[in-house]
Image: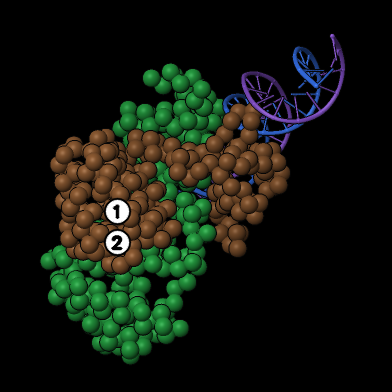
Chain colours: A brown, B green, C blue, D purple
Amino acid sequence: MTENQSKSKVFIETVNDLKGIIQEEGIKPGDKLPSERVLAERLGVGRSSVREALRSMELLGLIQTRQGGGTYLSDYRNHQLVEVLAQFILPDEAGSGYVFSTQRILERDAICMVALDENLCKSPVWESLLHNVIEGQTVMREDIIREMIVATNNRLVYKIWLLLNQYALRPYQGTTTENEKVHLERFLSNLRMGQPALALEAYEEWIDTLAKER
Amino acid sequence: MTENQSKSKVFIETVNDLKGIIQEEGIKPGDKLPSERVLAERLGVGRSSVREALRSMELLGLIQTRQGGGTYLSDYRNHQLVEVLAQFILPDEAGSGYVFSTQRILERDAICMVALDENLCKSPVWESLLHNVIEGQTVMREDIIREMIVATNNRLVYKIWLLLNQYALRPYQGTTTENEKVHLERFLSNLRMGQPALALEAYEEWIDTLAKER
DNA sequence: AATAAAAAGTGGTCAGACCACTTTTGTTAG
DNA sequence: CTAACAAAAGTGGTCTGACCACTTTTTATT
């Protein structure tokens, strides 16, 4: 099944093989990968091909490398690729716009899911977040959204969202403005009351305001 | 600014240099890059380092390569990265139902987008699809959904959806049953009339019925 | 047993050699 | 002169071997 596409390049296949090894071997983030030389022999390819695969994965942030030390599987969240891609994509807003709107699709769905679920929207998380906002503590937009997406209990969506987050030129960071607090309060309280439409509305306004403030 | 981090690896620097060359030279998507050998000499590094950089960029979908032909700057919007990361992220989730529900999130959004847009929902595509259904011609669920997602004009979403489609244990294939036709008609006509809520409802029923029929 | 030195292991880089394929060039037949 | 074909040059794809710099392990010394 690997060779039905005989045209695929060795280094691409190697990336796939690497994935296979990682799975079979049960290698977890933080664990060490076999050395380049071992991998080359094991996969029956040249070391240079292994390196091309590894370097690609490194640029993606999938692995980390310490000279003389070894290669380690990294937490997928450490995408350094953000910077790399940003350099290429930034001059070309169209690309980043897709990331942004895709993220919002997932977020809107999460909001609906939470608001429509009696148990979810009653969760003490929202109350505590709301409390933090009122108390003036810094509450990150990211954290709130993350909570919602986690709550919907779809790991795949969560992973995709995390990924997009890395790509997004996230315009929302820093301290919470007074204006933002208002939106947040409205949003969270509507969420808790199980009002998907109202929560969505508040969410849209919140995001729009944020985007404009830059 | 490039050498203040003396530790950065050659292939990483090369990626940046490449970016610089692309900018200086005014190389646009579709244009040809200098050959690997030329780049190596020009940057004063080994060809293997150039290759590691190029391969990384290729895995990101930043460039395309034709053996014997050359290396070409590709449209950054072709997020190949989705596929690559999918290799690492998706397999764990396949068959878990997450793929299915994630797909539906994207589809529901597309339906809303189309139905809410005056121009989109008036598109002759839906009419023609509806016509085909009535005429008894085989209309694939996939094709209809695809049309909608394409219509929303978010290439990233489209790519992700295609990907999920491959991983999904897609229960919908084969001939269109009479029962399905009813749902389809209802769905498409609501879509054309710009009724997002009704279209969504019909969609949900349609999908649910399909899932049950297996 | 603690410490220091040597060895082995590992990633980083380069150079050169082929191969397969494509593009260009040059030649030849019409 | 043009069209078709063949040779040559260019280019990416891959492998091998060689160093280097750094880290980890082993060994030897005190």
- Report if residue A117 is visible in the image: yes
Q: Position of residue B160 (x, y in %)?
A: 38, 58
Residue under label 2: A121
Find residue B129 and report its image quarter: bottom left
Residue drawn at point x = 41 percent, y = 83 percent: B212
Q: Is residue B108 left or right of residue C2?
A: left
Give the percent coordinates (x, y) of residue C20: 60, 49
**At x 59% / y 30%, what residue is drawn?**
A66
Name the residue carrying label 1. Answer: A126
Locate residue A211: give its quadrant.
Answer: top left
Picture coordinates of residue A100, whole percent (x, y): 28, 49
Give the quadrant of the N terminus of chain B.
top left
**Kind of residue at badge 1:** Trp
Disc 1, SS: helix
Q: Mark 2–mark 1 contact, CB under 8 Å?
A: yes
Disc 2 and disc 1: Cα gap in Å? Answer: 8 Å
Q: Is residue A118 left or right of residue D21?
A: left
